[in-house]
Image (cartoon, rainbow, N blue to C red):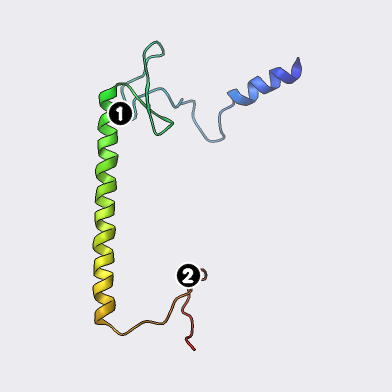
Amino acid sequence: MARSLACAFFFDAEPVGETGRHALDACALCTKPLRRDSDIFMYRGDTPFCSEECRYEQMHLDAACARQAASARRKQQQQGQRSRHETAPAAPVSRKAGVSVASC
């Protein structure tokens, strides 16, 4: 009996340094308090939202951020390709060690 009681307390414990805030207390977008007797709309596994609209808005924000990051990466790659063609070839770099490798 003591063993099962200990397990119950193990899963109820708060992490060190964390306050008594629970993950499902408020909407991740609008911070509206989530009621225990109403639906909670989840996104990405552990992010709660008060409504489908808030979840949908977050999905659109994430998609816009992903598009912006992809665009920035493409732009950076294009600039890198242009600068490689304009400058002298650099010494090969070891991907594993991150240092220049002497060529033979």
Residue that badge 2 annotates = 95
* Residue 90: % across, % down: 37, 82
Q: Is residue 3 left or right of residue 81?
A: right
Residue 34, numbered circle: none
Please tell me which of labels 1 and 2 falls first in the chain: 1
In the rendered image, residue 74, in percent from the top left (x then y), is placed at: 26, 60
Asked which secondary structure carries label 1, the reply is: helix
> Measuring 36% from the left and 18% from the top, which residue is drawn there?
34
Work out whether 94 lies above or below 51.
below
- Where is residue 21 drawn, in percent x and y? 46, 26
Q: Quadrant of residue 43?
A: top left
Q: Amino acid at mark 2?
A: Arg
Q: Is 42 situated above or below 35? A: below
Distance, label 1 to label 2, CA atoms, is: 40 Å
Q: Are marks 1 and 2 in contact (CB under 8 Å)?
A: no
What amino acid is labelled 1 in the image? Arg
